[in-house]
């Protein structure tokens, strides 16, 4: 089971967003676990305040280092406890327990993509840190964060929405989460190509008919058509992806013959 720990000031936002649809069903089946960790619970004052003015002045407030650090330490302890006897046996054998991977959702990070989702899906647990206000004290980021990840070149009010995007993309790659595990292998951005167009019943809708090849039952021709449509869609909508796409010689020949597009 893969475990996600989302450190946030707004745990209800995360719970509400990830407790439905595919992710919610996967959690109820025990295929993955998503836990919202309320940073305010680790505040060290009676008002549960976790922010203060930044040194040097400037607009807005900054999340303080200590509540974030204490929340992280509590998550680390929980992970060690959940690993249970297995972790204990490894420690007795002299193995050093590995700290969890901590992802800070920030516009300053690497841009999140499918390749990164596949990389993160190999982890047993992920800790996601959501900033708010004007950010988080740099000192705690230096101490606990292993990855800085951005979901795009724009600014949001907090890291909760990016964290939910990351969980959704990564969780889909966990075996058993999708009803059809093959789906995760053939969707958009696999091989850096966009997904081909898809159709369902009826055969004709608003005068538009399903492409004949999809009605033929000829699986080789259908796969060839789908591959070509993926290439064309990528060429027309995201030509930048073609530079990194894993194209076969046949794909390249097809592209060369589409010089008229």
Image (cartoon, helix red, strand yellow):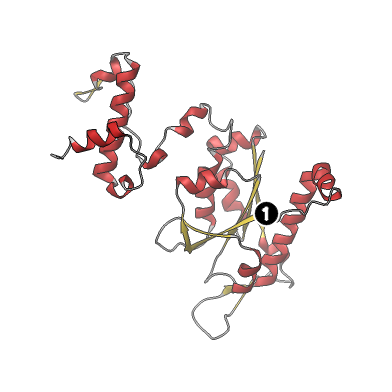
Q: Position of residue 150 (x, y in %)?
A: 47, 58
Residue that extends furthest to the left in the rendered view of this protein: 260
148 relative to 195 in the view: left or right: right
The answer to whether residue 131 is above or below residue 32 is below
| Residue bearing mark 1 | 100
- Quadrant where the N terminus sits is top right
114 relative to 17 in the view: left or right: left
Residue 17 visible to an observer of this rendering: no
Residue that extends furthest to the bottom in the rendered view of this protein: 56
Q: Residue at x 31, y 35 (%)?
A: 230
Q: Residue at x 27, y 38 (%)?
A: 233
Q: Position of residue 174 (x, y in %)?
A: 58, 37
Q: Where, by quadrant of the figure, is residue 245 drawn?
A: top left
Q: Where, by quadrant of the figure, is residue 31 drawn?
A: top right
250 relative to 119 in the view: left or right: left
The answer to whether residue 175 is above or below residue 132 is above
Q: Position of residue 146 (x, y in %)?
A: 60, 60
Residue 146 visible to an observer of this rendering: yes
Q: Residue at x 74, y 71 (%)?
A: 44
Residue that extends furthest to the front in the rendered view of this protein: 249
Q: What SS does tag 1 mark?
A: loop
Badge 1: residue crowd in 10 Å (few <14, some 14–19, many ≥20): some
- Quadrant where the C terminus sits is top left
206 relative to 159 in the view: left or right: left
């Amino acid at each position: 089971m893969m475990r996600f720990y989302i450190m946030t000031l707004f745990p209800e936002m995360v719970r509400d967003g990830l407790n439905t649809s595919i992710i919610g069903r996967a959690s109820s089946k025990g295929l993955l676990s998503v836990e919202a960790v309320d940073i305010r619970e680790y505040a060290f004052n009676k008002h549960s305040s976790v922010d203060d003015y930044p040194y040097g002045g400037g607009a807005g407030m900054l999340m303080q280092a200590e509540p974030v650090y204490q929340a992280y330490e509590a998550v680390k302890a929980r992970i060690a406890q959940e690993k249970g006897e297995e972790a204990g046996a490894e420690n007795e054998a002299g193995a050093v327990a590995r700290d969890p991977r901590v992802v800070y959702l920030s516009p300053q990070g690497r841009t999140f993509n499918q390749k990164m989702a596949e990389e993160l899906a190999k982890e047993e647990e992920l800790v996601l840190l959501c900033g708010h206000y004007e950010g988080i004290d740099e000192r705690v980021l230096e101490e606990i964060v292993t990855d800085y990840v951005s979901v795009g070149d724009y600014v949001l009010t907090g890291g909760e929405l990016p964290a939910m995007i990351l969980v959704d993309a990564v969780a889909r790659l966990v075996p058993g989460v999708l009803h059809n595990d093959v789906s995760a292998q053939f969707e958009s951005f696999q091989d850096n190509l966009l997904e081909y167009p898809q159709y369902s019943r009826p055969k004709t809708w608003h005068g538009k008919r399903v492409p004949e090849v999809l009605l033929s039952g000829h699986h080789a021709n259908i796969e060839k058509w789908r591959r070509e449509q993926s290439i064309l869609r990528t060429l027309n909508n995201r030509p930048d992806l073609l530079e990194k796409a894993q194209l076969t010689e046949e794909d390249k020949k097809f592209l060369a013959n589409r010089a008229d597009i």
